Image (spheres, rainbow, N blue to C red):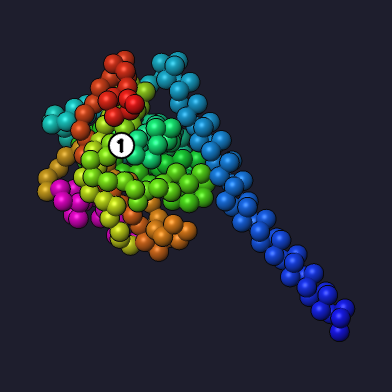
Amino acid sequence: MRVVVRAVSELCITVGTLIVLFVVYVLFWIGVKADNVMGDQIDQLEEQWARGAVQPAPSAAPGASATPAEPAPYKSGKPFAIMYIPRLGFTWNKPVLEGTATGTLKKGLGHYARTAQLGQKGNFSVAGHRRTYGDPFKDFPELRAGDAVVLTDGATWFTYRIDKGPYKTVPTDVEVIDPVPRKSGYTRAGRYLTLTTCDPEWGSSHRLIVWAHLDSTQPVEAGKPEALRR
C-alpha cells in the first residue's frame, strides 16, 4: 500500500512540475521569442526605409477629399508600419503586418486586409493579442479617449486620437471594423482607426475595441510628432 501511495505521490509531483514548466514556457519563453520576432520585424522595416524602399500611403491629410479605400496593396504576412501608443509606455512600439492569420499575429499586430490603408479614408483596422506572443495589447483596458495612437510607414507620421473605448463586444460583431462603425459614434465617412483585442485577459469569449480618428499627419523628415516627444 505504501508503495502505491508513494508512486501516486511521485506521479502527482511529476505532473505538477510539468504543468509549472508549461506555464513558465507560455508566460515567459514564448513572450521572449515573440519580442525578438517583433524586434526583427521592426529592424526589417527600418532597414528598408533606410534604403529608400518606402511606399507612402495615398493622400491622407485630414479633411482632404478621397475615394473609398481599395483593398490594401500590402504583402500578406509582411510588416509595413510601426505603431506607437504613449499610454502603454514610451518604449512601446509594435510592427503592423498585413493580415490577421494566426502566424501573422505571432509576429506583431495584424491589419484587417479588407479595411482601409493607413491614413486613407475609411477604417484602418488592426488586431493584436492581449496575452501570449509578447502580450502586445496586455494593457489595452488602460486606453482612454484623447490618447494618441501614432503610426509611421517610413514616409509619414500619422497621429490618431481615440474617441471611444475600450468597448466590449462579441467576436461575431464584425461591424466594429466597418468603414463607419455603427457603435463608434461616427456618423459619416472619415479617416478612422479601430484596434481590437481579446477579452478576458486569458480568454477569447469577447473583444475589446477602441475607435480613433486621424488627427494629424507630418512627413518623417519633420521629426517625431508631438505625441511622441517626452
In this rendering, is residue 73 above or below 106? Answer: above
Residue 52 on image: x %, y % = 41, 16
Q: Quadrant of the N terminus?
A: bottom right
Residue 214 on image: x %, y % = 22, 35
Identify the residue at horizontal 31%, vertical 15% (top origin): 221
Identify the residue at horizontal 80%, vertical 69% (top origin): 10
Residue situated furthest bottom in the rendering: 1
In this rendering, is residue 222 above or below 206? Answer: above
Residue 213 on image: x %, y % = 21, 39
Neighbours of disc 1 within 10 Å: few (<14), some (14-19), many (20+): many
**Residue type at numbered disc 1:** Val
Residue 13 on image: x %, y % = 75, 66
Q: Is residue 5 visible?
A: yes
Q: Is residue 64 left or right of residue 150?
A: left
Identify the residue at horizontal 45%, vertical 44% (top origin): 136
Q: Is residue 199 left or right of residue 107?
A: left
Q: Main secondary structure of the magenta part?
A: loop
Identify the residue at horizontal 83%, vertical 74% (top origin): 7
Question: Which of the two residues, 182 or 224, is positioned nearer the viewer here?
Answer: 224
Determine if the magenta segment contains residue 172: yes
Magenta highlight range = 171-186
Q: Quadrant of the C terminus?
A: top left
Q: Is residue 114 visible?
A: no
**Disc 1, SS:** strand
Q: Which residue is mark 1?
A: 149
Determine if the magenta segment contains residue 13: no
